[in-house]
Image: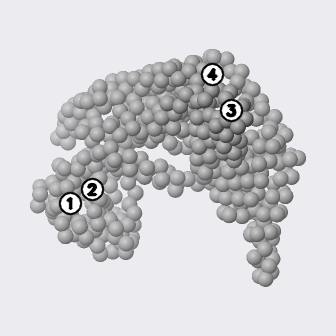
Amino acid sequence: MKFVAVTSCPTGIAHTYMAAEALQIAAKELGVEIKVETQGSVGAENELTEKDIKEAKAVIIAADTKVSKERFTGKPIVEVGVQDAIKNAKDVLEKAKNAKVDAQNITEQVSTIKAQRSSTRKGPYKHLMTGVSYMIPFVVAGGILIAISFAFGIEAFKEEGTLAAALMQIGGGSAFALMVPILAGFISYSIADRPGLVPGMVGGMLAGSTGSGFLGGIIAGFLAGYTVRYLKKSIKLPKSMQGLMPVLVLPLLSSLIVGLLMIYVIGKPVGALNKGMTTWLSNLSTGNAVILGLILGLMMAFDMGGPVNKAAYTFAVGTLAAGQASEIMAAVMAAGMTPPLGLGLATRIAKNKFNTEEREAGKAAWALGISFITEGAIPFAAADPIRVIPSIMIGSAVTGALSMMFKVAITVPHGGFFVFFIPNAVRNLGLYIVSILIGTVVTALIVSFLKKDIKQEERKKAEETVA
């Protein structure tokens, strides 16, 4: 039985190494193998390899500081303080022997991975994703309110004074109206901090009024952010007037520059491009729509929440409009649900291909899949990327293509299975469910076919060890 561990204390000196030594002594006494990575003041030493982690029964993190857990996805993790490892190393190892991956552990790991991905974003991608992350709650809230309005009838909101009209006003007239200004404002905020908010949001509002929409909002956000950054470097005021920079000089000049550029230079051309793209999407032939759905499906599964996945999702959100359902959004959401659902099904129909920890992770994958959290597939992809990633890409491509072929459309950008219960939120709901089910089954069958029996894998490892 083999374990891996990471030890780290705030100072990175004594206790980091004392905990490592205690775990090594206890492992020797208990007759088990352990490799300990120390994250001390001089950096990581005795670093764990992918092979070490894959062969380990469980991971022990004995730390009083933050330790990244992304590389341990899919493994049972026992977390203790360094003092616990120093004083009760045997107890810690015994706990690790019986550790299992449960649904909560997998869900927490997925949340950690999402947070770590956010923290490692850099450059324009980071700025765009910052804007998107602030925008999404407005779009989700607005979309669901619009969907609830439709529950009273597709055109019930046209009758003034009714609850349906009020819901449409809140969701479509207010929350959706803020979508582009919030996107642009927080792209600019990511670039230039607080002074970027005003010109970014002003540019976003102008993107809406000039018809340049989502694309115009993205351009306005970057333009505002870099304009503010340039002005901050270029304008030098006396110390007695420095207080005017954030409240008067920067917001006034940057809003003026961004506003004039949006009205006279950017708005009309981007508006024409936006209109052209909308017309092209609405006039797609069935064959072209299927190909687009297939490509979006591949993108959603490729990196499971990474940059490629987010590019497809951001494109889909841009096709949403207040009160109008989007076929692109439907295809992207379905394709994003398929990977964890397919892997969850695979752990049920081919139990001999998955170890105990992976079968436990499969239970969590169901919940994450129906919630449209594609990252639920990461534990399986991390353990066996060569077999899993192609499988989930094919399954998602099938789902995306079928969704587009069936002309399914949806009014909300998130919510997964739970929005299915809102009447009129999904057009062609029955065929939408069929698309997701077929993609899920395709994923499960391919994974089950490609993965080897666990006992065969163990025999192969034993033969390699002997050799």
Depth-wise, is mark 4 or mark 3 nearer the camera? 3
Q: Mark number for residue 92?
A: 1
Question: Which residue is depicted at the point 46% across and 38% down?
Answer: 371
Q: Earlier in the sequence, mark 4 or mark 3?
A: 3
Q: Amino acid at mark 2?
A: Val
How far apart marks 1 and 4 lie (CA) works out to: 55 Å
Q: Is 425 left or right of 394, judged from the image as shown? A: right
Label 2 SS: strand
Other-residue count near label 2 (Cα within 10 Å), few / some / many at <14 / 14–19 / ≥20: some
Label 1 SS: helix
Residue 32 in the image: above or below residue 278: below
How far apart marks 2 and 3 lie (CA) works out to: 54 Å
Residue 49 at what x, y percent from top left?
33, 51
Q: Is 208 left or right of 156, judged from the image as shown? A: right
Given contact means CB atoms under 8 Å apart, are the residues at marks 2 and 4 in contact?
Answer: no
Q: Earlier in the sequence, mark 1 or mark 4?
A: 1
Q: Amino acid at mark 4?
A: Ala
Q: Nearer the viewer, residue 252 or 98?
A: 252
Depth-wise, is mark 2 or mark 3 nearer the camera? 3
Asked if residue 344 can be seen in this view, the reply is yes
Residue picked out by circle 2:
78
